Amino acid sequence: MTSPVWHPFTQHGLGEPIPQIVSASGAWLTGADGTRLFDGISSWWVITHGHCEPRIAAAIAAQAGTLDQMIFAGYTHPQAEMVAQALVEMTPPGLDHVFFSDSGSTAVEVALKMALGHWHNRGEARHRILVLEHSYHGDTIGTMSVGARGVFNRAYEPLLFAVDTVPFPEPGREQATLDALERLCRAPEKPAAFIVEPLVLGAGGMLVYPAAILRDMREICAQHDVLFIADEVMTGWGRTGTMLACEQAHVVPDILCLAKGLTGGAVPLAATLASAAIFESHRSKDRSRMFFHSSSFTANPLCCAAANANIAIWREEDVPARVAALGAALDDGLATLAGHRALRNARRIGAIAAIDLHVPDAGYLSDVAPTLRALALADGLLLRPLGNTIYLMPPYCATCAEIMRVFATIGNAIETVGR
């Protein structure tokens, strides 16, 4: 019988197999047929410490017997208060207010609405949003609008709002990026905000740029009073080697978006942190100036309990050291592919490694990525290349031996595809 499920980013017309996963532990998934798969992409970049992490699982179970769900408009609960206080303490000074939502896309939607509401409530007509070339911020209407345009959102173009794009800081062309941002910030129609993925553009191809450029972009925005939004949905919680990617540039954004690893990846929860100035521009005795946003599951107690367990792990264990060890293993793995005629641009930051496959017609809709994915699957590896970009973003519990086995699988797959 055909399943009624409509899967994301899946062309069902191709009839590709869809394996059923029934359990997980650490860095491994187990299929209904008993097959074990190494989770090379942390199940879409969310799992940090490992699947079914005992402390997080126990926190969710305990909370389920106490308070499972409640309206968060006008009410609160202990788990949410604890998460919010911890986030303010763990993030750079100046991010004093926490707004909860339920996914990375909604965290960014909230950030965009906060920015526009801030200027509206101050009586300034600022509507333009600046974005970085090749960026991705989600699949809702607002987040698609501030992401790269292409085949992914072409059908929805009538719904998207216009933005101004700053070129990606390619090596040797960083100054062109800064000059473009300066020019746009100086324009007569002053921008409301500039949104960036700090240090790494994920879905754009795991494109890495220097911390110094992130710092310079932040300074330009500050000089021109343009709000700076850091989308750390993917880069946060250790992926780049530090708790936040912004830390490496000593940058404090006006608005910060967190999700994915906020609960260790176990359950969906997101948070958008904002400065006191942005909060105050919405606070008033006038109800029309309140922040008009919510979802039914805002600050769900089960999800907040998971987040508090994750935060406890960060406070009590040396997670950065674990990430550093994983990064060293990824470097060793990339070294095994060095010199391969079909590979280009090996790169690694924190717990993210990527390399580009240099073959003809290797775009997002080519057969290269599905072929690589199938070859990896046959050898016990969950991989999901971005077009011709092969990347690894495993859970932090992955061992050096596991990583080397993964790179052996990738090397074999490349030999088949690159012939």
Image: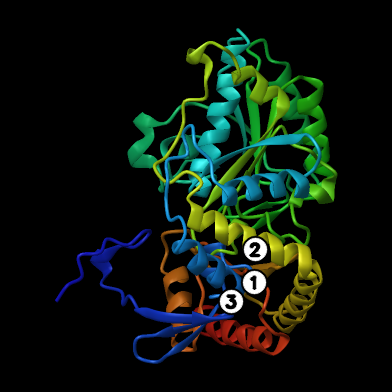
Which residue is under mark 1? 49
| In this view, the mark in front (2 or 1) | 2
**Is residue 390 something that shows in the picture?**
yes
**Left or right, 48 with reference to 384:** right
Name the image quarter holding residue 273: top right
Q: Secondary structure at mark 3?
A: helix
Distance in Å between CA atoms under marks 2 and 3: 11 Å
| Circle 2 residues within 10 Å: few <14, some 14–19, many ≥20 | many
| Circle 3 residues within 10 Å: few <14, some 14–19, many ≥20 | few
Which residue is under mark 2? 310
Q: Residue at x 48, y 76 (%)?
A: 372
**In what quadrant of the picture does the N terminus appear?**
bottom left
Distance in Å between CA atoms under marks 1 and 3: 10 Å
The answer to whether mark 2 and mark 1 are in CB contact below 8 A is yes
Camera-side residue: 347 or 17?
A: 17
Which residue is under mark 3? 54
> Which residue ends up furthest to the top in the rendered image?
123
**Left or right, 354 with reference to 69:** right
The three-letter code of the residue at mark 2 reads Asn
The three-letter code of the residue at mark 3 reads Pro
- Residue 32 image point, x, y percent: 34, 86
| Circle 1 residues within 10 Å: few <14, some 14–19, many ≥20 | many
